[in-house]
Image (tube, grey):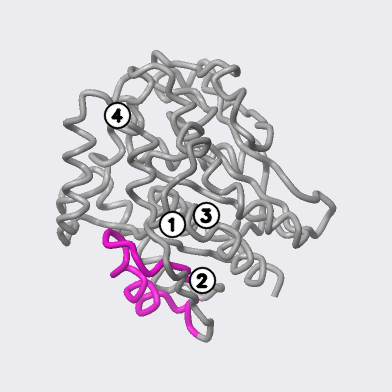
Amino acid sequence: METYRTPDDAFAAVEFRPASYAEVTDPDRPEDGPTLRMAYVDAGPREPGTPVVVLLHGEPTWSYLYRHVIDELVAAGVRCIAPDLIGFGRSDKPLATTDHSFARHVEWVRELLFDRLALTDVVVVGQDWGGLIGLRLVAEHPARVAKVVAANTGLPTGDFDMPEVWWMFRRAVESAPTLDIGRFVEAGCVRPLADADRAAYDAPFPVEEAKAGPRVMPTLVPTRPDDPATEANRAAWEVLTAWEKPFLVAFSDSDPITGPMAGLLQQLIPGTRGLTHPTLTDSGHFLQEDSGPELGRVIADFVTG
């Protein structure tokens, strides 16, 4: 697997917390042991008994997306682990789109959280692809998870078509000669991004060939019943429809892509019952940008309550 490692100086102007790093396995060379560097933010207290929240981002962002959420959680005495998916942020970036698969991304995050960091009793927070990956981890490793927060996400199996607005996004990503990451993030927000924030989303990709991850992720979403990820996602749904641990649905009011999933999650997952599920107003797909502090407080109350 040929990879690209973004130089540290590409992030020099980005105001964000420092990264920690762990090695995860290159599936093309498992006999060589871990060979991919995966970045993550580890913030907040680490005393025994401190609640741990895992914040999983999606396409085409990185852990920077959660900066305001992290601030609120740390202030509430919560430890935060916010990984950068392989191919994104400060993590190594495979240069071939064929190096990415749904299963590989699930395994890379699992290896980081459970093998390298040995986390238990975590609260999994997932948005966009962070939810697709996170819900698989929840279903496949339920003993490691205490609570779940789903924020503008779902777990498609390909049995139902995606909305046209999602297909428009996929076609735009596939056809763009140059992928403007900051512009795509801003298009998923209600409020315009500050110039510094747009630059922060562009920072991980100083060369176009490093964008294989953002380019390929839309094509990895199951859109047909025979998709390679369909059976694993169906198996995850079998677990989720019997999930009774607390499961919070915290969606925004202005996300045409995932909006309908909020009601479906509440209908199908037993752990949602008896909870008050907030809707973050005046917020788009990237609700962490539009309502980051509010989302942070929602999660903090859910974790510590």
Q: Secondary structure at mark 2?
A: strand
Give yes or no for residue 142 being in the magenta stretch: no
Q: Secondary structure at mark 4?
A: loop
| Residue type, mark 2 in image | Phe
Task: Identify the residue under disc 2.
Answer: 247
Q: Secondary structure at mark 3?
A: loop
- In three-dimensional space, the C-alpha distance between marks 2 and 3, rounded to whole angstroms, equals 15 Å
| Picture layout, residue 43 above or below residue 213 | below
- In three-dimensional space, the C-alpha distance between marks 1 and 2, rounded to whole angstroms, equals 11 Å
Specify start and end residues of the magenta stretch as a single range.
247-273
Task: Identify the residue under disc 1.
Answer: 135
Task: Identify the residue under disc 3.
Answer: 141
The quadrant in which the C terminus is found is bottom right
Front-lying residue, 102 or 75: 75
Dot 4 or dot 2: first in sequence order is: 4
- In three-dimensional space, the C-alpha distance between marks 1 and 3, rounded to whole angstroms, equals 10 Å
- In three-dimensional space, the C-alpha distance between marks 1 and 4, rounded to whole angstroms, equals 28 Å
Dot 1 or dot 3: first in sequence order is: 1
| Residue type, mark 4 in image | Leu
Q: Is residue 301 left or right of residue 280?
A: right
Front-lying residue, 138 or 123: 123
- In three-dimensional space, the C-alpha distance between marks 4 and 3, rounded to whole angstroms, equals 35 Å
Q: Nearer the viewer, mark 4 or mark 3?
A: 4
Dot 1 or dot 2: first in sequence order is: 1
The quarter holding residue 182 reads top left
